[in-house]
């Protein structure tokens, strides 16, 4: 195993010789073997141990084992105790969140380049089977990735039986986590009952499953390459908005598959996107970060703006540079003026903000007032254009739908002698 591990390490992770390594070590056989192997082949190796305090004295003894091993081999050892009681998360998910967040903190504060974890071939098989029972696309059939950001998993080619045999042969200490014997967790039940039955049905079930994972990874890579080519054809980027021909999307076959490939990375459910194909103009669906909107014969895909968050900027007479550039002049005439106002009607600081429900103004050329939302509708604003539109206000009154329409209450008259010119850069 040692030679195979060394060969795999150097062929799959060639940059390691110049990197600082952090190894996640629980005290179990997998991570202790991983640490022992890495210690032989790499120079800059440090250890991170998480004590979740879930098993009383057993947790304390796990920590003692890791700490004593590091002292014996003169390795830097980071140890931290955690409380896994995070709201709305299972203990396992809470522990995972805490663990990986801490690893990232350690990397940033200590200049570690990568983090090694001890996931192995059996873990990979269990993950595949769990994903199948939950329902999954092609990505869920590719198992555990060998690399995810700075997280590396060099033991994925090795089976649990090989790891235990190596630990015994080289007298590597480890501790058993007795909670692994419980069937309360789905992964344990899969490990204890389902996988042994598969091996009974076919002696090479484990090896063949790993082969299937490898084949599926290759297929997924081909699909990803085709998806990127399709996006280059369909996704036309203009002013931070992606424009996508609806008729071109409808022509894709199989439709459901390609819609998932194209829109799932943005968080959209393929069923909602399919419904949107026949929706009226202006209909939108949203994810945490993105909006997909129906326009004339096309989809508009853009980053969502949190309308609940009020963004407001004070504007003084010397002007403003961000988020847009406005300059002010007191000259009666200014050849670059975007808008000229009666200066006596304005009070500084003015306010620059986005529109909100109930906003209204008195457009030049009209009698009476008009809701900003109605103005947007009449001018055929898209949702992204509404979200991007700024309003310049004096007090609570809208002076200018910036770059578009001014309010007549602030316009100069025949008797105006004090002018204020606004230049929109």
Image (cartoon, rainbow, N blue to C red):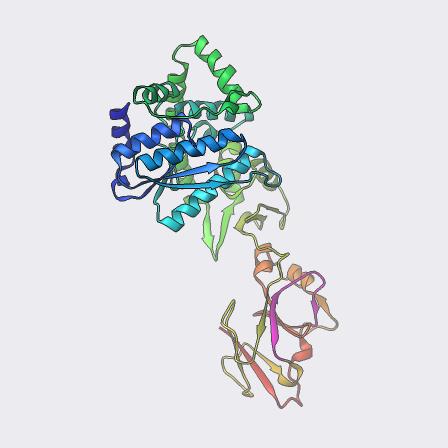
Quarter of the figure with residue 347? bottom right
State whether residue 181 is above or below residue 417: above
Q: Which residue does the image show at 66% across and 88% down from the upper left? A: 414
Given residues 121 and 399, the one toward you in this image is: 121
Q: Position of residue 420 (x, y in %)?
A: 58, 83
Given residues 316 and 18, the one toward you in this image is: 18
Given residues 198 and 346, the one toward you in this image is: 198
| Count of numbered badges drawn on the protein | 0
Q: Which residue does the image show at 64% across and 46% down from the upper left? A: 280
Q: Is residue 263 left or right of residue 219?
A: right
Q: Position of residue 324 (x, y in %)?
A: 51, 69
State whether residue 32 is above or below residue 168: below
Whether residue 265 appears in magenta in the rendering, the answer is no
Whether residue 351 appears in magenta in the rendering, the answer is yes
Visible residue check, residue 155 = no
Quarter of the figure with residue 391? bottom right
Q: Quadrant of the N terminus?
A: top left
Q: Position of residue 325 (x, y in %)?
A: 50, 72
Visible residue check, residue 397 = yes
Quarter of the figure with residue 200? top left
Q: Which residue does the image show at 45% across and 50% down from the upper left? A: 236
State whether residue 184 is above or below residue 95: above
The outermost residue toward the right is 368
State whether residue 367 is above or below residue 86: below
Residues in magenta, as a range: 348-362
Q: Position of residue 206 (x, y in %)?
A: 40, 17
Given residues 413 and 57, the one toward you in this image is: 57
Q: Which residue does the image show at 58% across and 63% down from the upper left? A: 389
């Amino acid at each position: 195993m040692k030679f195979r591990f060394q060969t795999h390490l150097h062929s799959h992770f060639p940059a390691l010789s110049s990197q600082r390594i952090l190894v996640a070590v629980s005290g179990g056989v997998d991570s202790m073997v991983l640490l022992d192997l890495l210690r032989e082949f790499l120079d800059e190796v440090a250890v991170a141990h998480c004590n979740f305090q879930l098993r009383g004295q057993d947790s304390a003894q796990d920590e003692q084992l890791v700490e004593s091993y590091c002292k014996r081999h003169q390795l830097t050892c980071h140890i931290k105790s955690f409380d896994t009681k995070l709201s709305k998360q299972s203990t396992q998910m809470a522990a995972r969140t805490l663990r990986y967040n801490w690893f990232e903190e350690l990397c940033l504060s200590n200049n570690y380049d990568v983090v090694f974890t001890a996931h192995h071939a059996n873990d990979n098989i269990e993950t595949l089977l769990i994903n199948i029972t939950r329902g999954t696309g092609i990505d869920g059939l590719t198992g555990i990735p060998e690399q995810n950001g700075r997280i590396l998993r060099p033991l994925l080619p090795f089976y649990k039986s090989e790891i235990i045999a190596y630990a015994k042969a080289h007298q590597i200490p480890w501790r058993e986590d007795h909670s692994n014997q419980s069937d309360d967790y789905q992964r344990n039940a899969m490990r204890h009952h389902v996988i042994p039955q598969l091996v009974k049905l076919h002696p090479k079930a484990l090896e063949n499953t790993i082969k299937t994972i490898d084949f599926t990874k290759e297929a997924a890579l081909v699909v990803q390459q085709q998806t990127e080519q399709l996006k280059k054809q369909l996704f036309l980027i203009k002013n931070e908005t992606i424009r996508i021909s609806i008729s071109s999307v409808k022509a894709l076959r199989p439709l459901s598959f390609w819609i998932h490939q194209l829109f799932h990375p943005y968080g959209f459910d393929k069923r909602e996107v399919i419904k949107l194909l026949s929706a009226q103009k202006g209909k939108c669906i949203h994810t945490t970060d993105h909006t997909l909107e129906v326009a004339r014969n096309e989809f508009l895909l853009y980053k969502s703006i949190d309308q609940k968050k009020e963004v407001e900027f004070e504007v003084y007479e010397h002007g403003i540079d961000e988020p847009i550039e406005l300059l002010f002049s007191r000259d009666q005439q200014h050849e670059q003026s975007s808008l000229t106002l009666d200066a006596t009607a304005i009070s500084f600081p003015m306010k620059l903000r986005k529109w909100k429900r109930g906003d209204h103004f008195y457009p030049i050329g009209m009698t009476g007032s008009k809701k900003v939302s109605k103005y947007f509708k009449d001018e055929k604003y898209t949702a992204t254009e509404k979200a991007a539109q700024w309003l310049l206000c004096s007090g609570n009154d809208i002076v200018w739908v910036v770059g578009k329409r001014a309010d007549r209450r602030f316009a100069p008259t025949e008797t105006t002698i004090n002018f204020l010119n606004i230049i929109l850069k």
